């Protein structure tokens, strides 16, 4: 399976982030980014701006390209 944009792993990660911001990044093994996305979305949902981070989380997971060795 090819890695990077459009790969099955990225689609799964984007779907995960659709339900919980940061979960897709966690599935991809990016713990720090997952924590940042989750916390920012949680904090900003208080002032109704969490949808911005939520969308960013989905797009970031879908467009992620792992570093080439």
Image (cartoon, rainbow, N blue to C red):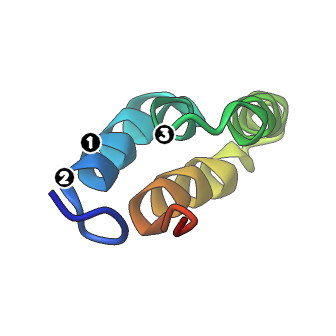
Q: State the image quarter where residue 52 is shown.
A: bottom right
Between discs 2 and 3, the one toward the N terminus: 2
Local SS, label 3: loop
Mark 2 closeness class: few <14, some 14–19, many ≥20 residues within 10 Å: some
Q: Residue at x 25, y 69 (%)?
A: 6
Asked if residue 19 lies left or right of residue 35, the reply is: left
Between discs 1 and 3, the one toward the N terminus: 1
Q: Nearer the viewer, residue 59 or 54?
A: 59
Q: Percent position (x, y) of residue 53?
A: 68, 51
Q: Residue at x 37, y 48 (%)?
A: 14
Q: Give above or below for 54 relative to 45.
A: below
Local SS, label 2: helix
Quadrant of the frame with the N terminus? bottom left
| Callout 1–callout 3 Cβ contact below 8 Å | no
Q: Mark 3 = which residue?
A: 28
Q: Residue at x 57, y 51 (%)?
A: 57
Q: Percent position (x, y) of residue 61?
A: 48, 54
Mark 3 closeness class: few <14, some 14–19, many ≥20 residues within 10 Å: some
What number is the disc on residue 8? 2
| Callout 2–callout 1 Cβ contact below 8 Å | yes
Quadrant of the frame with the C terminus? bottom right
Give the Cα separation between the discs numbered 2 and 1. 6 Å
What number is the disc on residue 45? none
Local SS, label 1: helix
Mark 1 closeness class: few <14, some 14–19, many ≥20 residues within 10 Å: some
Q: Percent position (x, y) of residue 33?
A: 73, 42
- Front disc: 1 or 3: 3
Q: Give above or below for 20 relative to 28.
A: above
Q: Give above or below for 6 relative to 40.
A: below
What number is the disc on residue 12? 1
Q: Residue at x 21, y 64 (%)?
A: 2
Give the Cα separation between the discs numbered 2 and 3. 12 Å
């Amino acid at each position: 399976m090819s890695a990077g944009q459009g790969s099955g792993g990225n689609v799964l990660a984007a779907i995960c982030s659709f339900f919980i911001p940061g979960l897709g990044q966690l599935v991809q093994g990016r713990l720090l980014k997952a924590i940042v996305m989750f916390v920012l979305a949680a904090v900003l949902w208080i002032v109704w701006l969490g949808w911005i981070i939520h969308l960013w989380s989905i797009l970031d997971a879908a467009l992620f390209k792992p570093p080439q060795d």
